[in-house]
Each structure stands twice: as structure tokens, then as C-alpha cells.
Amino acid sequence: MSDETTPATTIDPLDWDYAPSVESTPVDIPAEQGLWIGGEMVAPVSDAGFDSINPATEETLGVLAEADEADVDRAVGVARDAYDDVWGSMPGKERSKYLFRLARLLQERAREFAVLETLDGGKPIREARDFDLPMAAAHFFYYAGWADKLDYAFPGADPKPLGVAGQVIPWNFPMLMLAWKVAPALAAGNTVVLKPAETTSLTALEFARLSAEAGLPEGVLNVITGAGATGAALVTHDDVDKVAFTGSTAVGKRIQEAIAGTGKRVTLELGGKAAHIVFDDAPLDQAIEGVVNGIFFNQGHVCCAGSRLLVQESIHDVFVEKLKERLELLRVGNPLDKNTDIGAINSAAQLDRIKALVAEGETAGGERWQPACDLPEQGFWFPPTLFLGVAQSHRIAQEEIFGPVLSIMTFRTPEEAIEKANNTPYGLSAGVWTNKGSRILWMADRLEAGVVWANTYNQFDPASPFGGYKESGFGREGGRHGLLPYLGGVA
Ligand code: NAP
Ligand code: MG
């Protein structure tokens, strides 16, 4: 199943709904792809495969290899050899050169990677182009800068790599989650076996090829595609020293159980149900933009999405009216169109989950509102949705919907806002809109969330650590803190 031997399909984005605003950078996708192990594409032991599809058209983009336990064993073995023979003992200043090269190449090929990300995952090209890819490259640049400064990062400690990192990532930000995991792991001197999500593996495989272009020594980065069983085999493999997982809380719990007592280091970045809190003294038009971005960015497939709007009772009606007007302007459709605001739902399974929770929200007594919008006939789509009259006990106020659905509730006092915001098992993020600086600090002190945005939302920077409390997981990614999970000998 090596891609060297199979013809490549050229996807021409212009084929679908031609318009001047449709992204026109062509990408080559191999018809069949293997596993990236030891610096080359190899066939999986079992020869099993699965299709990767474009969720906006339901067209097959290519057949991917499904790695089983034997493949996982091989990838981990190769990563161990690369760690022992080359990477683990390479001086940081040398490792850093490879990371800079990866960052630069990714930057040079960002447009092509953005198109691939959009085709495979359904996100608007504007987001892939302006957010996912520049941020992914920025993470490699940032950690390249740390690779030769670990002693300065942790003065008085004796930072040492751990060995082989087994990393499992979700489908919502495929390249960015890869960068969050791979960049600090390699900077710290570990080697990597990465399993991307089943529905969005194409950019990880392309990045693997890019790593060869960058001259990264063979076996330092390995990418194995497959389903949940592949991820389970990877994280439980005896020779994996460090497990890094981003995904759902349910799977995170299963992983923690599976590796309990093994001595493996683990970090879990899990789900969220963020409160987005708007006070009556907030700049309302800006708050509307923040709330819209908070829930509709990437179709709401965002762990830190502001999926619960808590609006102060005195401005509820005017705020909801403005919000509805703004939603009427959102464009849902062709993800490759640069004017699209909301792209395709990532998979049929995710669409079913969104529909089921929305139906349940209505049954429970929530009032559903959606703007008039034509959805394409092919593909997986869901319109931007508001729920009014939501009670805290409703499932749509408690569970992660992971779709373009906002549950709206009210509060009267700051104390009540805090009580409602914290009334969830999650603790990943929150947003506060108010004109009073002292109130922002008061709120930030009391919100149980890894990140609190004030008068803005969804701001990220490689230098800024990100991670959760409670059932949103533990460990931090980004910043100097993001190195800690990949190092021994540090506090
Ligand atoms: P998921 O179902 O938990 O899957 C995540 C990854 O784990 C996928 O690669 C999946 O493979 C794999 N997997 C499934 N079962 C496994 C097992 N038993 N052992 C090891 N790996 C296994 O989550 P998802 O639906 O892809 O992603 C959405 C979730 O990710 C949401 O809950 C979201 O909040 C969370 N998320 C959190 C953050 C954060 O930083 N906190 C960031 C982004 C997303 P398959 O693809 O084959 O199922
Ligand atoms: Mg796909």
C-alpha cells in the first residue's frame, strides 16, 4: 500500500461550484497511502484499509492503512531505536535546526496544507489558511527556540527526554493538534509515534513526508493511521514512555484506566462546555462578534467553544435580537469558498450526535431558533442554532454538543454567573465581557477554567499554556509549561 507505487488523484477545488472566491491551489492526494514508519511509507501488516472522505461532498479522497498491534509494535520499535541511536543524545542546538526546518517548510507549503485540511475535515478554508496552518508553524518555530535552552527553561534542574512518546489526536484541528504534540516532544529530545483521527489523517501523512524533506532522521517521527483500536494499542504499548492524548473525556478516562500502574507519564486534553458570560455594561456589538466566533468557529467542533451563553437578564432580549440578526448573515456552505463562515460537519457520526442532542434539547423544553439557510444536498451540514429558555439541568447545557449550537441562559448577579458557569464537570475555558477591569479579575479568580478570555475569545499563542481542570483533563500544552510533560528531571 505504499504511495510510491499508486497513482495520485489530483483534486481540483475549482470543480465544485466555481466562483472567484473558491480557493484554487491544487493538491495531490495519493489514491492509497501506507503507514509512515522509519522515514518511509510502508504497507500495514494486515493490508487492512479504510476510506478518508470529504465531508462536504462525501467523495472518497483516498484509502488509508489501518495499523494493528503488529504495526504499532514496529513503529514503537523504530522510534525506540531512533531515540537510542540518534535523537535522545543529539545536542539541543542540533535538534533545534531540524525543528526550524520543519517550521519553515510548513510555512512555505501552508496554502497546500490548508486546502488538504479543508478537503479532509470540512472546515472553512479561511480558518485553515488564517488560523490552523500559521498557528501550527508558529508552534514549531516556538519550540525550535527552546530545544537548545532547556537548562535555562528549568534552572537548577536536570532536564532529560523521556524516550518514546505515543500521541493520539482528534479531528477538529488535525495539523494544529499535531503541532501541539510533536513540536514540544521533539524539542525535548523524545521520538514520536502519532495516531491522527480516522476522519482527518491526510495532513499528518503529508507532514510525515515533509519531515523527510526537512531531513529529520528516520524513525524520529512516525505516523500510524487507524481507528480507536490503533490508538489503544499505541498508548498501552510497553515501550511507550509518555502518552499524550487529546480527545473526548470518555476515551481519556478509558486510557487512564488502561495505563494505570504502568509508570507511563500521561497528559490528557479533553472536552469542555465553556461559559461565555456577557454583562450589561459590555460593548454589545463586540460581544456579539465574540460570542459568534466563540461558538461557530470551526462549526463548533472546538473543545474550548463558548457553547453556553450566560447573558445578564437586563440585556437578554436586546442581545438575543442582535445575535439573531448576526446569524442571518453567516454563510454556510462550500468550505473551499473564502467567504464561507460555517463549513461541513466533520462526519456522519458527528452530525447524528448533534441532531440527537438538538432533538433532546427541544423535548426538554428549549426553544430552537435557526436562520433561514439552504444547505447543500450532498455532505454533512447543520445550520447555526440558538437554544433559548435553556435550564441548567438540560443535557444541551451539560454535555458537549461539538457542533454549531449555542445554549442561552441568563443570570442577575456576578455570583450567580459564577455558580452557573462552574456548574459543569468540565473546566477548560470561559469568556467574560464587561467594561469593568476589577470585575474581570474577580471573575477570573472564581471561574474553574484553564483559560479565561476577557473581552475577546479564542485567542491562542504558542507561548501561552493551554489545558484543563476537572474532567477537561490535566497537563498543559504551549509555552514553557508545554515542555514539562516531555521531560524527566524537572519539578
Ligand atoms: P475521541 O473520540 O476521544 O478520539 C480522539 C482520538 O482518540 C482519535 O484519534 C480516536 O481515533 C482515538 N481513540 C478512540 N478510542 C481510543 C482508545 N480507546 N484508546 C486510544 N485512542 C482512542 O475524540 P474526537 O471525537 O476525535 O474529538 C473530539 C473531542 O476532543 C471533544 O471532546 C473535544 O472537546 C476534545 N478536544 C479537546 C481538546 C483540548 O485541548 N482539551 C482539543 C481538541 C479536542 P478515531 O478517530 O479512530 O476514533
Ligand atoms: Mg476526512
Image (cartoon, rainbow, N blue to C red):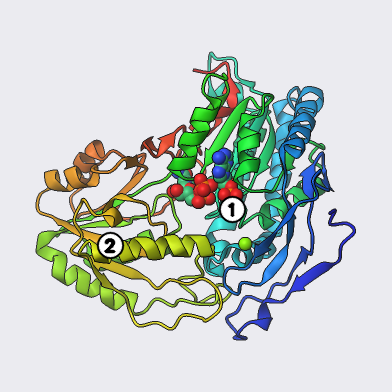
**Neighbours of disc 1 within 10 Å: few (<14), some (14-19), many (20+):** many
Could you tell me if residue 480 is visible in this image? no
Answer yes or no: disc 1 within 8 Å of ligand 2: no
* Disc 2 residue type (three-letter): Gly
Return the residue nearer the eye: 320 or 3. Answer: 3
Q: For mark 1, give the secondary structure.
A: helix
Give the percent coordinates (x, y) of residue 310: 21, 56
Residue located at (79% from left, 32% from top): 78
> Which residue was labeled with disc 2?
361
Along the polypeptide, which appears first: circle 2 or circle 1? 1
Give the percent coordinates (x, y) of residue 473: 42, 36
Q: For mark 2, give the secondary structure.
A: helix
* Disc 1 residue type (three-letter): Pro
Return the residue nearer the eye: 144 or 171. Answer: 171
Position of 218 relative to 11 (above/below): above
Position of 70 relative to 410 (above/below): above
Of the 4 image quadrants, the one containing the N terminus is bottom right
Give the CA separation, mark 2 to mark 1.
30 Å
Give the percent coordinates (x, y) of residue 296: 40, 64
The label nearer to you, 2 versus 1, is 2
Which mark identifies residue 174?
1
Residue located at (39% from left, 82% from top): 373
Return the residue nearer the eye: 141 or 430. Answer: 430
Give the percent coordinates (x, y) of residue 312: 14, 58
